[in-house]
Image (cartoon, helix red, strand yellow):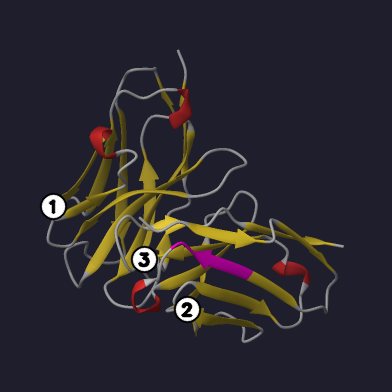
Amino acid sequence: EIVLTQSPGTLSLSPGERATLSCRASQSVSSSYLAWYQQKPGQAPRLLIYGASSRATGIPDRFSGSGSGTDFTLTISRLEPEDFAVYYCQQYGSSPLAFGQGTRLEIK
Amino acid sequence: QVQLQESGPGLVKPSQTLSLTCTVSGGSISSGSYYWSWIRQPAGKGLEWIGRIYTSGSTNYNPSLKSRVTISVDTSKNQFSLKLSSVTAADTAVYYCARRPVGRTGMDVWGQGTTVTVSS
């Protein structure tokens, strides 16, 4: 069973800054089946990145994903006001699927 | 486009069985190759994957819940369902259904979520 650990727990930044979020897996994620989701209050999660580095349909190119094996990163190049939310990583390469505990991105 | 909608009782008594349904609209649940999952989120906490059913009907469950969970599909109604038995207050959460196409794509379509409270 793969456990995902996200860091930091909370990230305080200003609009226009660059955000770097980390997700570390307890064992290698099969075929880089690693996704990132954004969740705003009262809403369902939204798929941002899949396969570690592919943007989902309609996701702006300021969002990018990288990594393989056990270490993955979500980067938001220039923060827009609507980007402040909670971000989750998820591995879906093996059962049971698992989510990280989330990183809260808040306005500084 | 495909949309998912959860439905079911918002209040369940302790020790009873929680039953939720996810209705798929805008497409057939049995066409294509998809995993149909249930995920839950207690208030103020993170996401927990409960389990999934494949288009063929095969299932996988979270080991932490496996003894209490059943996920099934009703293709005639274009729905899949979740049953969670012997509930306690710890099962109080927002429950989401979601779709993941087979392959590298993640969970690309989610329902809006439904809140279930376990209380007497």
Under mark 1, the amino acid is Ser
Please determine whether, in this image, residue B87 is positioned above or below residue B81: above
For marks 2 and 3 on the same chain, the one whose residue lies earlier in the sequence? 2
Q: Could you classify mark 1 by the number of other residues whose Cα lies within 10 Å: few (under 14), some (14-19), or many (20 or more)?
A: few
Marks 1/3: CA distance? 28 Å
Q: Decide if residue A23 is on the left or right side of residue B28.
A: right
Magenta segment boundaries in residue numbering: A22-26
Image quadrant in which you'd find residue A17: bottom right
Which quarter of the figure is the N terminus of chain B placed in?
Answer: bottom left
Residue B92 x, y percent position in the rendering: 48, 31
Q: Decide if residue B92 is on the left or right side of residue A9.
A: left
Q: Which residue is mark 3?
A: A92
Q: Decide if residue B102 is on the left or right side of residue A79.
A: left
Residue A24 within the magenta-colored segment of the rendering: yes
Image quadrant in which you'd find residue B95: top left
Q: Residue at (38%, 29%) from the top-left corner?
A: B9
Under mark 3, the amino acid is Tyr
Q: Which residue is mark 2?
A: A52
Same-chain check, marks 2 and 3: yes
Which quarter of the figure is the C terminus of chain B placed in?
Answer: top left
Residue A36 x, y percent position in the rendering: 52, 69
Q: Which residue is mark 1?
A: B76
